[in-house]
C-alpha cells in the first residue's frame, strides 16, 4: 500500500474519532433534573427496603430484595458516573468557597446512603456537594463576596460560580469589582439568577420562587426569555409560572436574617468612613454626611479595636462612641453629623 493510501486511512480513522468525541459532548443534565432523579431513586430504595409482606403471605424473598437494592444502587452509580463523565472536567470538585460561620446546629453535607457530615468552620465547599442548612450560615466565596444561607434551606454546589437552591432562602452579596465572581448565579425551578454587582435574595417557598434585589441588578434567565430585575424590586414566580412584581424597601425586616449573618468587619487602623460605607451596604441605608466637619472627621479619624461578634447596629454604636460625631437612623438612611452641626441645629 502506498504512503498516500496509508495516510488516507489514518485520516479516516482520525475523522471517525473526532465524530465520536463530538457525539459524546452532550451537555450534562441540569441540577434540577439530577435532583428529581435522586429523589425518585431514593423513593424506590425505601419502597424496596421497607416493604412489608401482606397479612398471612410469605415474607419477601431476601435474595430478591438484595438484588433489587443492588439494582437501585447500580442505577444511581451509573447515572452519577455518566453525569460526571459528561460534565465539564474544569468544574468537577471546583471550590465555590469556604464556611466562615454557622449558627447551631450548623450545616451538614447530605450524602446518599451515608450519614450526613457536619462542616467545621473553614471547611471547603466543592462542586458536586449538597448541603442541608440547619443553622443560618455564611460562606466566603472564593471569587469574592459571600453567600448567606438561611436555616432549613438545602442547596447544591453546581460549579465554582453556581449553586442550585432546592428549598429555603439564600442571600448573595458580591460587591462591584469582585471580578472572580462576575458570572455567579443561583439556579432555581424558575430559572437562573445571575448577579450584576449586587446584593439579592432568592427563596423557594411552597413551590414558588421569590427574588428580592437589594443593590445593583440581577439578570434573570428563564425559558420565556431574559430580563433584568433592578434594586428595590421583588419578583415572585409560582408553580404555574404566574409572575408577580412589586417594589420593596431595601431596609427592614425582610433583610434582617441576612444582616445578622454579615461578615465581620475589620476596623483596626481604618478611617471611620470605611466602616460607614460598610454599614450602609449591610443595612441598605443611604449614607448622609450632614456637614463639612463630619466629612473631614470621617475621613481622618482612624478606628482601633474590634467589632467582631456584634450586630451591625451594635458595631455602629461602638465605633461612633469613640468619636465626637453623632448619628441618626431616619427611614432608609444613616445621617452623620459633627457635634458643631448638632449644636447649631438646636
Image (tube, rainbow, N blue to C red):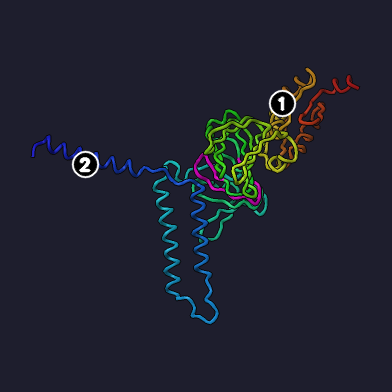
Image quadrant holding the N terminus, namely top left
Is 254 situated left or right of 227 in this image? Answer: right
| C-beta proximity under 8 Å, tags 2 and 1 | no
Relative to residue 55, is residue 8 depicted above or below?
above
Relative to residue 255, is residue 56 depicted above or below?
below
Q: What residue is rendered at 71% in x and 30% in y?
A: 280
Q: What residue is rendered at 48% in x and 45% in y?
A: 30
Is 82 situated left or right of 32 in this image? Answer: left
In the structure shown, which secondary structural element does the residue marked by tag 2 occupy? helix
State which tag comes first along the sequence, 2 or 1.
2
C-alpha separation, residue under disc 2 versus residue under disc 1: 67 Å
Q: Which mark is residue 172?
A: none
Residue 22 is at least partly visible in this image: yes
Residue 170 is at least partly visible in this image: no
Q: Which mark is residue 13?
A: 2
The single residue placed furthest to the top in the displayed view is 292
Is 123 situated left or right of 104 in this image? Answer: left
Residue 248 lies in quadrant: top right
In this figure, which residue is indicated by the disc labeled 1? Answer: 273
Q: Main secondary structure of the magenta part?
A: strand
Image depth: mark 2 or mark 1 in front: 2
The residue segment tinted magenta is 147-164
The single residue placed furthest to the left in the displayed view is 1
The image shows residue 179 at horizontal and vertical percentages of: 53, 30
Image quadrant holding the C terminus, namely top right
The image shows residue 57 at horizontal and vertical percentages of: 50, 80
Q: What residue is rendered at 62% in x and 51% in y?
A: 133
Within-10-Å neighbours for mark 2: few <14, some 14–19, many 20+: few
In the structure shown, which secondary structural element does the residue marked by tag 1 occupy? helix
Q: Is residue 197 magenta?
A: no
The image shows residue 211 at horizontal and vertical percentages of: 63, 39
Amino acid at each position: 500500500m502506498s504512503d498516500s493510501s496509508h495516510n488516507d486511512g489514518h485520516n479516516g480513522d482520525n475523522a471517525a474519532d473526532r465524530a465520536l468525541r463530538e457525539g459524546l459532548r452532550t451537555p450534562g443534565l441540569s441540577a434540577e433534573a439530577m435532583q428529581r432523579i435522586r429523589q425518585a431513586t431514593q423513593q424506590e430504595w425505601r419502597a424496596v427496603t421497607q416493604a412489608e409482606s401482606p397479612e398471612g403471605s410469605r415474607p419477601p424473598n431476601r435474595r430478591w430484595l438484595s438484588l433489587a437494592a443492588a439494582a437501585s444502587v447500580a442505577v444511581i452509580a451509573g447515572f452519577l458516573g455518566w453525569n460526571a463523565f459528561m460534565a465539564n472536567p474544569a468544574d468537577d470538585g471546583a471550590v465555590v468557597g469556604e464556611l466562615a460561620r454557622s449558627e447551631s446546629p450548623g450545616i451538614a453535607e447530605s450524602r446518599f446512603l451515608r450519614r450526613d457530615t457536619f462542616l467545621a468552620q473553614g471547611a471547603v465547599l466543592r462542586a458536586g456537594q449538597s448541603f442541608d442548612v440547619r443553622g443560618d450560615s455564611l460562606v466566603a466565596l472564593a471569587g469574592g463576596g459571600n453567600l448567606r444561607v438561611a436555616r432549613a434551606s438545602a442547596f447544591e454546589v453546581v460549579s465554582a460560580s453556581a449553586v442550585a437552591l432546592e428549598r429555603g432562602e439564600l442571600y448573595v452579596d458580591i460587591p462591584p469589582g469582585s471580578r472572580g465572581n462576575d458570572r455567579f448565579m443561583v439556579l432555581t425551578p424558575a430559572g437562573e439568577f445571575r448577579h450584576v454587582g449586587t446584593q439579592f435574595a432568592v427563596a423557594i417557598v411552597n413551590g414558588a420562587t421569590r427574588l428580592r434585589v437589594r443593590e445593583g441588578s440581577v439578570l434573570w434567565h428563564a425559558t420565556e426569555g431574559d430580563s433584568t430585575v433592578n434594586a428595590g424590586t421583588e419578583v415572585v414566580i409560582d408553580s404555574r409560572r404566574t409572575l408577580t412584581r412589586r417594589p420593596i424597601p431595601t431596609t427592614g425586616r425582610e433583610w434582617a436574617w441576612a444582616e445578622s449573618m454579615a461578615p465581620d468587619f475589620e476596623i483596626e487602623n481604618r478611617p471611620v468612613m470605611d466602616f460607614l460605607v460598610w454599614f450602609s451596604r449591610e443595612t441598605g441605608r443611604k449614607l448622609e454626611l450632614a456637614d463639612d466637619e463630619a466629612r473631614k472627621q470621617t475621613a481622618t479619624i482612624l478606628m482601633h479595636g474590634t467589632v467582631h461578634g456584634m450586630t451591625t447596629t451594635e458595631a455602629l454604636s461602638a465605633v461612633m462612641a469613640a468619636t465626637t460625631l453623632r448619628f441618626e437612623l431616619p427611614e432608609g438612611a444613616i445621617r452623620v453629623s459633627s457635634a458643631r452641626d448638632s449644636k447649631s441645629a438646636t
